[in-house]
Image: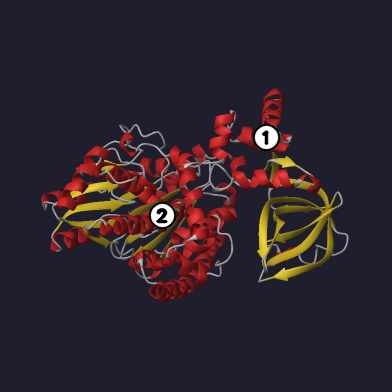
Amino acid sequence: MLYRWILKKLGEEGLLSLIRDQNKINSILAHLLVERNLLTTDSINNFLSPSLDQMHDPFLMYDMEKGVSRLINALREGENILIYGDYDVDGITSVSLLYDVLFKLGGKVSFYIPDRVSEGYGLSEHGVQYAASKGVSLIISADCGVTANLEIKQAKDLGIDSIVCDHHEPAQTIPEAYAILNPKQKNCGYPFKELAGVGVSFKLLQGLYTRLGYPSSDLEPYLDLVAIGTAADIVPLLDENRVFVRYGLEIINSNPRHGVFALLESSSLLGKEVNVSNIVFVLAPRLNAVGRISNAKKAVHLLTSSSLQQSRNIAKVLESENKIRRDIDETTCQEALHLITESIDLNNTKILVLAKKDWHPGVIGIVASRIMERYNRPTILISLKDGIGKGSARSTLNFDNYQALNSVRHLLDNFGGHKYAAGLTVREENIEPLREQMYRISDSMINEKDLAPTLEIESEISLRQLDATFLKWLKLLAPYGPQNMRPIFVTRNVEILGDVAVMGNNHLKFKVKNDGIVIDAIAYNFGKLKNELKPYGQRMDAAYVIEENTWNGQTTIQMKIKDLNLV
């Protein structure tokens, strides 16, 4: 076993019985609904059948009226508008969305994404000077800007107004922007606080269409972009985010735009049903790669292209740069693992703070996530160059990156982000003090038991319980993601039937039998157990999720193994 299995307790029997009887489902499905706090018929129906009518009024967001009025004036007066975005997938989709819509409305619009290495995250002095040189009078920041006090003041002094569309945690002092759209502002009464940056940008466009008298349904074809950015940014897939992703996936699977079609084609997803996992692990890394290796504007050109051939050409570039990115990832990860082995006592360290000269700043976030998953500890990776460190922080569920970095902000030149992911800039001489302070903070925030990797199990079931009704409800609970994770089940005494095949470099595929039922099983990264999993009769307890697998036009269910215990 790789994990300590924690079997969730079933809810109160009376409540489970009520939900079970009202919905004509079994106790396990009733338990899944209670776990998600879906206790009434209305809440269950709204969750299982999300509707576009569930989207909130954009004007509930603070400064929305002001921002929309300023944007309408810019469109009517023919002002030069610059969309200024981040270089990750959330930023790329935000820029693509705003640029495409405003361009089609006749706006004089351009876009700018900073260079990750030379400019770093968010609004930069260079970017503001670029805007001034192009005669821009309105900047709309997408997925950034809420902490860019100096840069927005610089723009204001140059006669440039700013509308900030952001979802990151605001600092104590907010910028002097014309309007700030961010549901996490203290004075914002917007009912859902967990929008991604692209979600905030979409709300601005909803407000714009409302005030222009256009039907907001005209924006529905853009929900594919909102879905990709939302899923890739790992925000909770609840409330409005769930609506965005559900409808966006329908577009991706039925009528993808040229750029998405080309991306599906180049990544071998064309013809398969795309889900959140495909976005996170297949599409997003390709869109991210150009922002990490070269410039993210290529990805914007891909997502806004009206030519399939041009889209295919750009997708090939993204595919090539993603391969380069993977090679750099692997080298950086091996160097980080070597540092841990050589210099860190894991028995007495609850957070990993690693720094090295000339790590590629475009991949340290990915590698920090991999290190965090491997050691189940919050991880900060810092790339040093010319005495300045650019860092990425990733955290586990019980450690708040933003709160921790905010408490040591005196040691940092800059920082921003949220609980699970953050970025920072730190001078080389402050890295050791930062490490010591983070050790102290982690000691107070993380319990020893938090360091032991665990797997939360929804329920023990037999394979016979995976009937058509059960599978239908599991499908309705999708899209899965943060705060609505795909449920993990355990089946005891599963028997392996036939041979255990090795797929790729390190994956195993075989058939299993339990209670007279046989299904396929796939075990990713379990190659080291090949010799222990004896064909024809090996028994085990399996912890797994249920997925659909389509091959040669045939769709079957399969057990995707998360952990196993040989018996």
Image quadrant in which you'd find residue 408: top left
- What separation in Å lies between label 2 and label 1 (alpha carbons)? 35 Å
Please give the residue where the numbered disc 2 appears in the rendered image: 221
Mark 2 or mark 1: whose residue is earlier in sequence? 1
Residue at the location (39% across, 37% down)? 56
Tell me if mark 2 has few (under 14), some (14-19) or many (20+) residues whose alpha carbon lies within 10 angstroms of its own.
some
User: Percent position (x, y) of residue 448?
Assistant: 60, 41
The residue carrying mark 1 is 31
The residue sitting at the top extreme is 14
Give the residue type that dot 1 points to: His
- Give residue 159's position: percent from left, percent from top: 11, 51
Specify whether 300 is left or right of 155: right
Q: Is residue 253 left or right of residue 163?
A: right
**Which mark, by number, is residue 68?**
none
**Residue at x 33%, y 39% (from the top left corner):** 58
Q: Secondary structure at mark 2?
A: helix
Q: Nearest to the eye among marks 2 and 1: give it.
A: 2
The type of residue carrying mark 2 is Pro
Q: Nearer the viewer, residue 421 or 344?
A: 421
